[in-house]
Amino acid sequence: MRTFPTIWRALRRPLSALALATAQLAFGAMAHAAPGYPTKPVRLIVPFPAGGPTDAMARLIGQHLSQQLGQPVIVDNRGGAGGTIATEAAAGAAPDGYTLFFATTGTMAINPSLYRSMKVDPVKAFDAVGSVASTVNVLVVPNSLPVGSVKELVALAKQKPGSLTFGSAGNGSSNHLSGELFKSMAGIDIVHVPYKGSAAAFTDLLGGRISMMFDTVSSQVQYIGSGKVKALGVSGPTRSETLPKVPTIAESGLPGFDVTIWFGLSAPKGTPPDVIHQLNGELQKVLAQADVQRQLAALGARPLPGTPADFAKLVQHDAAKWSPVVKASGATLD
């Protein structure tokens, strides 16, 4: 019969190993946790200058997120190079939850195919925190163009290949690629005319010097309402709440056409999962607030709540979607 000391000696080694393993697991959890997070201000890097619509949305979210977190969220505008400067700065920050990136469709899904000198792959360089909001473009034409629908516009373009033009805010912009996708899916030959901003393109549209352009609903709603331009279709999968009478392009003869511009929060790769989880939870509370929803609507956007996994999937999907469109357009930037 085995005595107690004998039994204890037999059990001591596996018990010691178990205790060591438990301690290692506990230490690992502590090393990755962020007790009391956040304990200092959080920096939100925004890829465009102050004063624009992206900045306005970022400041709105940052203000309310600050209230949820109990720490200031400081907006750091890093404009230039279509958002690549900010993207690289945010990706290189410490992955501790104190630097966030206000991600956009352009910076995450378009720029990697557009900029030859881009130093990071946004899909791989960030952890998704959560999507914030989405908006769509609207296809507008001058009153002088003799069309009243997407089908009539496509028919005219096929009758006169190469004679119609579409303006944009520049190569690789969302309204440029909206036009390229439209051109490809409709099987028409229309000529891209890049401008230094949407305002300059719209001035020429009003004057009839270009045939069409895609622009944000918030920018065009007043001109559509006053009859200065004709709205033929919105670019999203559903009709815009702001322009409920304007059909989608998908329902106007191009099934599957979808250009949805989204915004979200990302963090440098390696940010602790518990911090990501906490940030996402607070973001969901912000997006559920009626005041935030009203202010997003004023910017022509709608809340886009979801999990970090949802946002990661959206980024990956759109990066794969826009890469061939960018390549087909021939647009490249240094």
Image: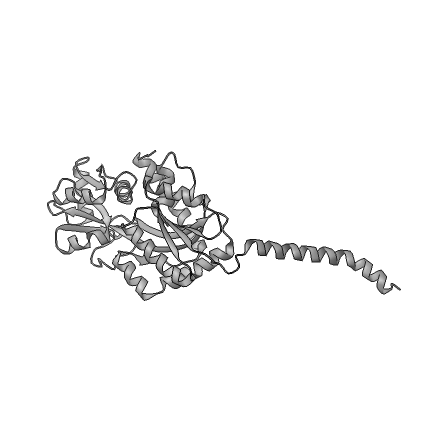
Q: Quadrant of the C terminus?
A: top left
Q: Is residue 152 left or right of residue 129?
A: left
Q: Position of residue 207 (x, y in %)?
A: 11, 43
- In this view of the protein, which residue sits in the foreground, 306 or 296? 296
Residue farthest to the front? Answer: 40
- Identify the residue at horizontal 29%, vertical 42% (top origin): 173
Residue farthest to the right? Answer: 1
Q: Position of residue 265 (x, y in %)?
A: 40, 53
Using the image, determine if residue 264 lies above or below residue 125: below
Q: Quadrant of residue 187?
A: top left
- In this view of the protein, which residue sits in the foreground, 179 or 196? 196
- Identify the residue at horizontal 19%, vertical 42% (top origin): 200
- In this view of the protein, which residue sits in the foreground, 232 or 169? 169
Q: Position of residue 180 (x, y in %)?
A: 27, 40
- Identify the residue at horizontal 18%, vertical 51% (top origin): 231
Residue farthest to the left? Answer: 144
Q: Is residue 321 visible?
A: no
Q: Is residue 213 visible?
A: yes
Q: Quadrant of residue 294?
A: bottom left
